Amino acid sequence: MGFFGNGDNKGFFDRLKDGLSKTRKFLLQNVDEVILGERKISPELFEELEEVLIAADVGPSFTYELIERMKEEVRRKDLDKADLLRKVLRDTMADILKRSEAPLLIPRNELFVIMVVGVNGTGKTTTIGKLAMRFQDKGMPVMLAAADTFRAAAIEQLEVWSKRANVPLIKQKMDSDPSAVVYDAVHAAQAGKADVVIIDTAGRLHTKVNLMEELKKMKRILARELPGAPHEVLLVLDATTGQNAVTQAKMFTEEIGVTGLVLTKLDGTSKGGVIIRIAHELHLPIRYIGVGEGIEDLRRFKSEEFIDALFEQNG
């Protein structure tokens, strides 16, 4: 089994820290304003903390669990100063994110199909391009499939990435049947053209029902032509959309069965706390996070690294 995600860690950590600066400011500065100083721990303090956390998009169920954990520590006399609450916040977040840390493992010399889903505008096609380059760099022959046949721009964008990554692209003309593209891609890969097939899919049709039926049909075709495929249904979410990202994740998971998540645009948002909510409520593996435009800004998700970057004092 092999997966990528090492290399240039120091550089990435600094970019992650910079990328999370808006979230850090929005979440932790407000938390610190509530808990720092020699304030006594009181019901009022917990109420204020609850308001701050809910506003930061970490979600009501995480907030409830966190406040309960803090109250329990106070009851056990393990906590007597308000500023120690920050450590409980950090530890609770770390515990939750750790459960969602799971790299995407791709077997060597075996055909592996990744179906990438998500609404338009999340960075789906760019994520596919970056993954293609990374896998290719790791010596895994990659093929891209342009199954978002409803947008000419999506096919063109994927074409640019396929040239950049120097990988083949399977496509048909606009408005053709996406499942036909998927069928062609699997057969080309089976003929020895690639070990990893990454499929771009539509993010918007006339209705949600249409979109989901289209995606289900693609999944059926894949399973029929290659038993076990798709091996990964990777959902790309845009962190800047906050609560909407959670709603999308629930919808795609219920409808087509998501197996992993990519959270993009963490560098452009103060709503990065939504990653806590997603991990806590959905229990889905977070495969990758994106903190910028560069190829190297899409990385395997490591919970400890994320928490360290978020809680850095000098960011």
Image: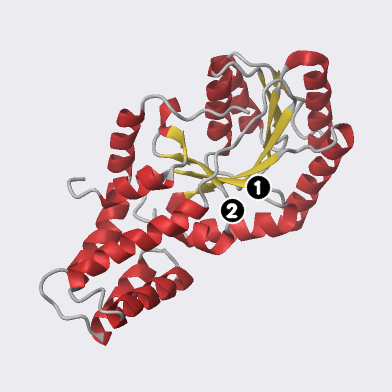
Cα–Cα span, label 2 and label 1: 7 Å
**Which secondary structure lies at badge 1?**
loop
Q: Which residue lies furthest to the right in this view?
A: 224
Asked which quadrant contains residue 92, the reply is bottom left
Q: Where is residue 243 in the image (x, y as percent from the top left)?
A: 49, 62
Is residue 133 or residue 67 the one in the foreground? 67
Give me the residue at 57% from left, 20% from top.
160
Instruction: Tell me the residue that label 1 is attached to.
Output: 259
Q: Position of residue 200 (x, y in %)?
A: 67, 34
Label 1 neighbourhood size at 10 Å, few (<14), some (14-19), many (20+)?
some
Residue 228 seen anywhere in this rendered image of the structure: yes
- Image quadrant in which the C terminus is located: top left
Mark count: 2
Q: Which residue lies furthest to the left in this view?
A: 38
Is residue 147 or residue 72 the one in the foreground? 72
Is residue 120 or residue 272 the one in the foreground? 272
Q: Position of residue 47 (x, y in %)?
A: 30, 81
Instruction: Establish if 33 lies above or below 157.
Output: below
Residue 147 seen anywhere in this rendered image of the structure: no
Q: Which of marks 2 and 1 is nearer the N terminus?
A: 1
Give me the residue at 17% from left, 46% from top.
314
The amino acid type found where label 2 is placed reads Leu
Query: Residues at badges 2 and 1 in contact (C-beta under 8 Å)?
Result: yes
Give me the residue at 28% from left, 35% from top.
14
Label 2 neighbourhood size at 10 Å, few (<14), some (14-19), many (20+)?
some
Asked which quadrant contains residue 194, the reply is top right
Instruction: Establish if 279 lies above or below 183.
Output: below
- Image quadrant in which the N terminus is located: top right
The amino acid type found where label 1 is placed reads Thr
**Which secondary structure lies at badge 2?**
loop
Instruction: Tell me the residue that label 2 is attached to.
Output: 284
